[in-house]
Image (cartoon, rainbow, N blue to C red):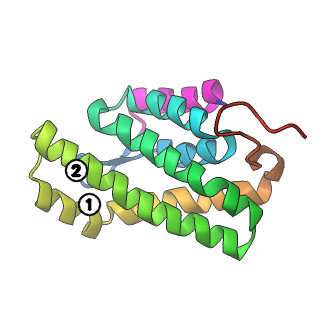
Amino acid sequence: MVAALGGLGFAWRALGLVIPLFPPFVMDIRETLTVITAFAGGPWVAIAVGILYGLPSGVPMADLPYSVILGLCITLAAKPAWKYRGPKGYAILFVTILISEALVLTIVNLILAYALQMAPFWPQMVATFLGGTYFVYVAQEIIPLILCIRLFPDFMKPRWLWRGGEEAD
């Protein structure tokens, strides 16, 4: 999973196949693949894939923590969402994505403003949340994740363990 989907996201970003949003944010398949691989693969896959997704970015100091933290937040909700598949499970995922996306975008804006001094913090926060970037990312994550759970349940079943490895069937 890390090699296939992590490599796909790495190559996609390295080739610059993105849709620009409010600067410095872009839309590509990395956000979608982050939540799918974290849900299906667990925390260690989320960390490895997050590193692969952050490396080829224009601002890897901000994208590395973004992808890793987002993936780890999704792993927290994966097993409860799987247990309550259907409206209740999807609500768990939706709330998790809303909160985790707000958290990671705030962290990215803090890094951009104070560590890299690329943009002032509050104007960037207003632009991120009111300019639509936040809502685009949430939609780009929740819709494909729910579709994958519905269409590919065997692949998406979170068989992973927190300490690593998989559950015995």
Q: Quadrant of residue 136?
A: bottom left
Q: Is residue 20 left or right of residue 70?
A: left
Prevailing secondary structure class for the magenta stretch in the rendered image: helix
Give the SS element for disc 2: helix
Residue stretch in magenta: 2-17
Q: Nearer the viewer, mark 1 or mark 2?
A: 2
- 18 in relation to 137, above or below: above
Residue 141, horizontal then vertical, whole percent:
53, 56
- 132 in relation to 38, above or below: below
Q: Is there a contact, CB below 8 Å, between mark 1 and mark 2?
A: yes
Q: Residue at x 27, y 47 (%)?
A: 108
> Is tag 1's residue or tag 2's residue first in the polypeptide sequence?
2
Q: Is residue 15 visible?
A: no
Figure quadrant of the C terminus: top right
Q: Nearer the viewer, residue 53 or 161?
A: 161
Q: Nearer the viewer, residue 94 or 4?
A: 94
* Residue that label 1 marks: 128
Mark 1 burial class by Cα count in 10 Å: few <14, some 14-19, many 20+: many
Q: Residue at x 56, y 61 (%)?
A: 142
Q: Is residue 148 magenta?
A: no
Q: Residue at x 83, y 47 (%)?
A: 154
Looking at this rendering, what residue extends furthest in the front direction? 163
Q: Is residue 29 left or right of residue 78?
A: left
* Residue that label 2 marks: 109
Give the SS element for disc 1: helix
Q: Is residue 104 left or right of residue 83?
A: left
Identify the amino acid type marked 1. Thr
Identify the amino acid type marked 2. Asn
